[in-house]
Image (cartoon, helix red, strand yellow):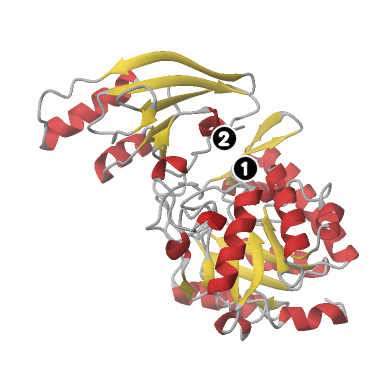
Amino acid sequence: MNVDKKLEGVIKEHPCYDSDAHTKFARMHVPVAPRCNIQCNYCNRKYDCSNESRPGVTSEVLSPEEAVEKIRFVKEKISALKVIGIAGPGDPLANEETFRTLELVNKEFPELTLCVSTNGLALPNNAQRLYDLGVRFLTVTMNASDPDVGGLVYDRVQWGGRTYKGKEGADILLKNQLEGIRRCVEIGMVVKINIVMVPGVNDEHIPELVKKVKSLGVYIVNILPLIPVEGTKFSDKRAPTPEERKKLMDKCELDIKMMRHCKQCRADAIGLLGEDRSSEFAKMKNCQAGCGPSPENSTPLMIDIDESDPLRVAIATSDGKNIDSGFGNASRFDVYSVSNGGVKLIRTVNVDTSKQVVGSSHKEHINGIVDQLNDCTVFVVKEIGHMPSKVLAERGKTVRISSGMIKKSTFRP
């Protein structure tokens, strides 16, 4: 790819695009984009999780204005900050907040480089918009250039008001990715492709994919190892060994530059790639007013709303007002119907917590709760243990960890 002369110097200060830069210059991801328009079989976007370091995870979701305040504060503390990225925890282009954030950041911090990471579904219609807002670096996560392979990686794609499954959804996604990448390269953006390597699914196909994106003018490719995550369809898949991944990168590097220093960053990562400092700045909203950690209940939990069927969401609560109970010790679950038409409390399920349960009795207790709430797809709890989490995952349920007041922002579409 022929890079604009003006961007050559910027690349040398971008930790993801230059292997030397990642030890000198810092980046900051602002988690302003909670909603996603596809479901990958390896992804579980578990918010409010400070102990996991992987894409799709964040300790909080910020508004565009809160993001700017936080950048202002972090910039004072980390002088090496050069790049502001938006990488989720959902897909940035499925969230209007992304564009408002870019507008505000570009206006106040023109010296910082703007970067966006997307699955590419909405890229063709937004390529020029991103460029006009100052974005010059774009990452597209692209796991196949063949819909048959993509159908194994993606569970569903939401497009044009409809939900498409498997190969049909993968075909729509692929066409938009290819056209979006072409447009971004054409207008002068530097494009990186992220590929999640899943042994036995897409690993043998990756060299073909790399050749395809090279033909579009992509600058660099990053082959990431699968992280098997509980609660996903790929939870039982194995991660590639370092040797397998290196061998594949060595082969693909004959065609295009490889990124070999990726840390698979969180959606709220801050600092050098190898020294993430996001925990230091977690839950620090309203930074102009002192920048102390905000109360837990100020962190809204975002539940994605499908464009088709309503969701049933069960919230662990003691009073009907707050998310304040763990799954196993909750005395009550309020069940909400969530759809584009709105949010409605439909019933309350009381749980008998008068008896102490351990061992097999504890598992029976957990299964009993799930049986009562079997129509629910999403469970919102303050905390959950390994065994209940596994039970829910086996039943195809999704768990969200949160706390604080139950309010409309909890279900923001």
Residue 331 sits in which quadrant?
top left
Residue 167 lies, with reference to residue 310, above or below; the image says below
Q: Residue at x 46, y 69 (%)?
A: 277
- Where, quadrant-wise, is the N terminus in this rendering? bottom right
Q: Residue furthest bottom?
A: 20
- Residue 367 in sight from this viewpoint: yes
Q: Tell me the residue at 70%/52% (across/down).
A: 101
Q: Is residue 359 left or right of residue 151?
A: left
Instruction: Name the residue type under label 2.
Output: Asp
Outermost residue toward the right in this view: 186
Which residue occupies 39% across, 39% down? 403
The location of residue 142, given as percent across then percent down, is: 67, 57
Spatial CA span between label 1 and label 2 = 7 Å
Name the one closer to the observer, 170 or 350. 350
Q: Position of residue 161 (x, y in %)?
A: 73, 29
- Secondary structure beneath disc 1? loop
Quadrant where the C terminus sits is: top right
Q: Nearer the viewer, residue 109 or 172?
A: 109
Image disc number at residue 36? 1
Where disc 2 sits, the SS reads loop
The residue identified by callout 2 is: 304
* Mark closer to the chain start, 1 or 2: 1
Above or below, 25 against 360 in this view is below
What type is the residue that disc 1 sits on? Cys
Contact check, label 1 and label 2, Cβ < 8 Å: yes
Q: Position of residue 104 (x, y in %)?
A: 73, 55
Task: Kindly indicate the quadrant of the structure image that contains residue 215.
Answer: bottom right
User: Which labelled disc corresponds to residue 237?
Assistant: none
